[in-house]
Amino acid sequence: MGEYGLRNDGCEVKIGTCENMYYLRYSDRHMIRPLEGNLDPNDDSILKELRWRLPFPDEDHIKPGEYPDYNRDAALCGEFTSPDNANDPGILQLHSKTGLLVNITCYHGEKLPENTKDVKFFWNGKKPAYVLKHLKFIDGETFGVYSCTECRREWRRPLKDLIPFMIRYEDQELVKRLIEWYCPDMFKKGMVK
């Protein structure tokens, strides 16, 4: 279900769908007032239920509700693994030009599906399997919501645990911002210079 709000400039905008604030950053929530029947992004009682858009620096000039890519994410480098996620598989559907559809169990890059007589699985230049999608705030801690790049199944982990796996992400300004705004203790512990 879509969630809508009234921006400070009087413009009615979509801010998200259900708990996913695809069009609203946590840092910009003060710029939105809820429309009747929609959630209030400033209501502390629902804060822990919401997932917020990542604060991409190249989008600083864009107003809430106007982001062109609602589902933008940031890659976690290939060293990031979460073996327990293989116990929570998803489904990857492949199709051919002739109409053949194949559903394959997705183990999120943690392991390959079992081979059969007719189907063989292997890696061909393995790439990162996970991306950071949203920020979530629960009881004073910032979590990163990350997902499988293939089947889009999602999990959460403390953001400070995910930051080290963004070291090769192309937008280091985003990484720096995430640390400064949401994980400042990483500087104190000498984890980041």
Image (cartoon, rainbow, N blue to C red):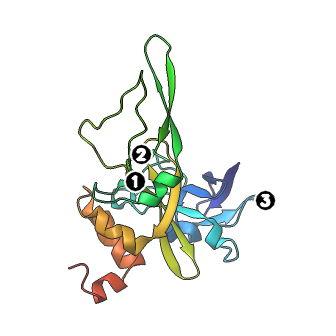
| Pointers 1 and 2 in contact (C-beta within 8 Å) | yes
| Pointers 3 and 2 in contact (C-beta within 8 Å) | no
Among the two numbered marks 3 and 2 on one chain, the one whose residue lies closer to the N terminus: 3
Residue bearing the label numbered 1:
131
Q: Secondary structure at mark 3?
A: loop
Among the two numbered marks 3 and 1 on one chain, the one whose residue lies closer to the N terminus: 3
Residue bearing the label numbered 3:
36
For badge 1, the amino acid type reads Val
Residue bearing the label numbered 2:
149
Q: Residue furthest left?
A: 193
Q: Residue furthest bottom?
A: 188
Among the two numbered marks 1 and 2 on one chain, the one whose residue lies closer to the N terminus: 1
Q: Relative to 172, is 85 on the left or the right?
A: right
Mark nearer the viewer, 3 or 1:
1
Kindly indicate the quadrant of the structure image that contains residue 172. bottom left
Q: Residue at x 64, y 67 (%)?
A: 49
Q: Residue furthest front?
A: 117
Mark 3 → mark 1, Cα distance in angstroms: 34 Å
Q: Relative to 131, is 87 on the left or the right?
A: right
Q: Residue furthest right?
A: 37
Where is residue 94? Give x, y as percent.
Answer: 46, 27
For badge 3, the amino acid type reads Glu
